[in-house]
């Protein structure tokens, strides 16, 4: 099923007191294709959960329209939208076992016992709960409880699956496994899905496309690779991954970086002007001072061993520090804090944004 959102607005507060109005969602438009998983990503208070709740029917829009396929859904109650939601808090019934929790919605729909049994058995295997059907929620781990919540949503055979930060209560290792399992299940069933999270790694790993929101508006929509390598602005660049921004300027005579002549081997098609040059940690080479190969001279102010990489923070005169990731740290002699260093910017890793005032 295709989802379409047109100029959606949600205000909270009193219309009699305009100063008391808060616009949680501000003229948001979005299309989600049939079978696509799209994640709403942003900081707390950006409007992503309010947008999800309007799609589900739990909040009424102030203005704008929501379409499921060709049907306008604004006045359709939640129980008639054929959408299922997986909540952060699991919301499973503590007095029902796994089987009865999953079957609860089917019983409300008054399906036959045979239909309920068949659909419940099928989804139990899909979410990896085989053999646990008789267990009570108190006998389940957090991950298993979330699988029950997922199964209860999927068993309804919804046209739209909604996820409201479903993995926030799980530990890091389990969260990683659950997002893999959710993605596999969603692709297998082909259900159009909207996923809400503030975790950029979660969003990047699970999504066909990511919608980055801030202050009720969409900052950028795109595939994970596009958002990471070609962010639309500094907010998106900073929210997705780590980034430093170096001041550069293009003139008729060429480029300058931090006031020094520079040949970036990139940005030839850009018009003259001032730019914020985005540098990702993996887009920089670090070498000891005196190597003679670097574009910039700096001082190491922090080095952190992270297993697969050594992370450095390098102070540069006249601008913000740059984070550098060096892979395979066991093959190198790490630079200590206070060491002078040279930075080489890799052309393929640069992204040029118009300078923000």
Image: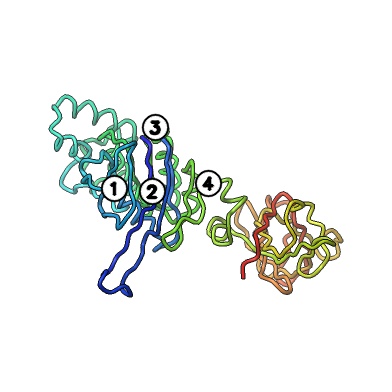
Q: Secondary structure at mark 1?
A: helix
Q: Say left or right for 136 vs 169.
A: left
Could you say which is closer to the camera, residue 18 or residue 333?
Answer: 18
Q: Position of residue 225 (x, y in %)?
A: 58, 45
Q: Position of residue 302 (x, y in %)?
A: 65, 68
Residue at position x 62%, y 71% from top? 357
* Residue bearing the label numbered 3: 190
* Residue bearing the label numbered 1: 56
Q: Quadrant of residue 106?
A: top left
Residue at position x 73%, y 51% from top? 331
* Residue bearing the label numbered 4: 222
Q: CA distance from mark 4 to mark 3?
A: 20 Å
Q: CA distance from mark 2 to mark 4?
A: 18 Å
Label 3 or label 2, whichever lies nearer to me, is 2
* Residue bearing the label numbered 2: 6
Residue 233 in view, yes or no:
yes
Q: Secondary structure at mark 4?
A: strand
Q: Secondary structure at mark 3?
A: loop
Q: Say left or right for 325 vs 7.
A: right
Q: Quadrant of residue 69?
A: top left
Q: Position of residue 292 (x, y in %)?
A: 87, 61
Q: CA distance from mark 3 to mark 2?
A: 24 Å
């Amino acid at each position: 099923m295709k989802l379409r959102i047109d100029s959606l607005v949600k205000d909270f507060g009193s219309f009699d007191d305009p100063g008391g109005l808060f616009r949680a969602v501000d003229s948001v438009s979005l299309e989600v294709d049939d079978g696509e998983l799209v994640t709403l990503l942003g900081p707390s208070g950006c409007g992503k959960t309010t947008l999800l709740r309007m799609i589900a029917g739990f909040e009424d829009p102030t203005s704008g329209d929501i379409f499921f396929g060709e049907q306008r859904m604004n006045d359709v109650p939640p129980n008639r939208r054929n959408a299922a939601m997986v909540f952060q808090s699991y919301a499973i019934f503590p007095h029902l076992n796994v089987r009865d929790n999953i079957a609860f919605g089917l019983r409300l729909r008054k399906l036959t016992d045979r239909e309920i049994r068949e659909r419940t058995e099928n989804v139990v295997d899909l979410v990896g709960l085989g053999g646990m059907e008789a267990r009570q929620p108190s006998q389940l781990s957090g991950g298993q409880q979330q699988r029950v919540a997922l199964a209860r949503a999927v068993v309804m055979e919804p046209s739209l699956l909604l996820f409201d930060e479903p993995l926030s209560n799980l530990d890091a290792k389990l969260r990683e496994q659950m997002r893999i399992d959710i993605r596999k299940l969603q692709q297998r069933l082909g259900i159009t899905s909207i996923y809400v999270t503030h975790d950029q790694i979660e969003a990047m790993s699970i999504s066909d496309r990511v919608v980055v929101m801030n202050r009720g508006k969409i900052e950028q929509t795109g595939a994970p690779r596009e958002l990471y390598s070609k962010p639309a602005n500094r907010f998106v660049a900073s929210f997705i991954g780590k980034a430093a921004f170096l001041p550069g300027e293009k003139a008729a005579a060429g480029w300058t970086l931090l006031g020094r002549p520079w040949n970036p081997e990139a940005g030839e098609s850009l018009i003259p002007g001032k730019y914020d040059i985005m540098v990702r940690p993996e887009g920089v080479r670090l070498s000891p001072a005196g190597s003679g190969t670097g574009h910039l001279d700096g001082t190491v102010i922090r080095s952190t061993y992270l297993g697969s990489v050594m992370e450095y923070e390098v102070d540069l005169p006249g601008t913000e520090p740059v984070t550098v990731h060096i892979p395979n740290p066991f093959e190198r002699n790490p630079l200590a804090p206070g060491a002078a260093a040279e930075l080489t910017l890799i052309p393929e890793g640069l992204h040029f944004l118009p300078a923000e005032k």
